[in-house]
Amino acid sequence: MKWGLSLFLVSGIVLAQSRSGLEYASEEIRRLQANDAENPGMLWVDRGAQLFAQHCASCHTVEAMKGVAARYPRVVDGKVVNLEAQVRHAGAPFAYESDELLALTSFVAHQSRGMPLRIEAPAKDVERGKAEYYRRRGQMSLACAHCHEANPGKKLGAETLSQGQPNGYPAYRLEWQTLGSLHRRLRSCMFGLHAEVPPYGSPLLLDLELFLASRARGLPVEAPAVRR
Amino acid sequence: MALARIQVPRETKRGELVEVRIVIQHPMETGYRRDAGERVPRNAIHSFACRYNGAEVFRATLSTGIAANPFLRFYFRAVDSGELDFWWLDDDEKEGTAKARLVVL
């Protein structure tokens, strides 16, 4: 009890605004994520370690990957570059959302586990995603903010709405029965809104990702997280 | 894509219960799912067994009611040091194997 109370006091200051999706998850899911022996996302991390040795190790060391995921996405020459795009840059020509790319990105992200997100991006680039975040879309005519800013913690059907924080991705979702990227998660929100579903890696999803990541500054990288 | 993660203590005392945990990467397709209208054929792990120094210590029958990437946990008693041999078979008749070492003090 004492431990729980002091944890609350310490984290209460930081998390008064931002709460990881983990805080909205059930006890069972939290346990699954916390335990590397049981977290199914670790299967992809293992695979990613093999792929890293094959495709990346001739230029990069594993140690150098520490903290990388906490700085992505970045803006390079006016374009948003997320971790997936960066991993694909050279020796790893894997398709978006392929098992190979998911394995590599989750391996790289895993190296930053526990480190706070610290995205640095020009305000004008973040503004683009912010505008999309507050734009109503689809037949439901809802914006991201209607669920994830106005109603986190409340129920939508059987689901508990979270703040829609991106710090756990790539994450293993029980609904998917597999590991998936943040873009897959965003696409399923779009589908739920009966809106046009943008393709993986499209400018809209990248802009949203940049805004979400800058909004999540300070939250720890949890990849591979487990979500419902 | 037979990839598994095994968690076994490195060492144990003679006669003590040993906890074994294994996660196997497998889609566990139910056969009821459709992909672009086409039915995805059923493919689930149906048999799983674990031998310790050649003797079977655990066996399980699985089916489509079990989620993808199944997680199994079981206990056994080890008398001598040795090797755990995991084996499983799915509906595509694809076999998977994995090994882990255990030292009995």
Image (cartoon, coloured by chain):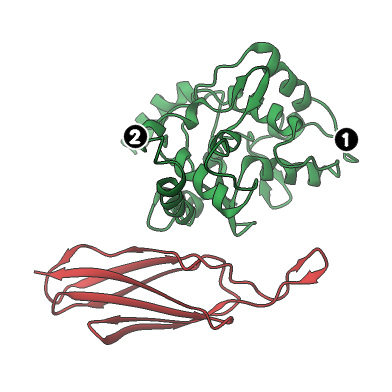
Chain hosting mark 1? A
Which one is in front, A174 or A5?
A174
Q: Secondary structure at mark 2?
A: helix
Q: Residue at x 40, y 79 (%)?
A: B87
Which one is in front, B37 or B67?
B37
- In the image, what residue type sits under mark 1? Ser
* As drawn, A37 above or below B52: above
Q: Pick the quarter of the image with the N terminus of chain A.
A: top left
Residue A149 visible in the displayed image:
no
Q: Residues within 10 Å of mark 1 (few under 14, many from 20)?
A: few
Which-is-in-front pick, marks 1 and 2?
2
* Quarter residue A194 falls in: top right
Sequence-first disc among 1 and 2:
2
Judged left or right of residue A216, residue A187 is right
Spatial CA distance of label 1 from label 2 is 45 Å
Judged left or right of residue B54, residue A157 is right
Q: Which mark is residue A141?
A: 1
Q: The chain drawn red is chain what? A: B
Q: What residue occupies the far top of the structure in this picture?
A: A123
Residue topped by disc 2? A63
Q: Residues within 10 Å of mark 2 (few under 14, many from 20)?
A: few
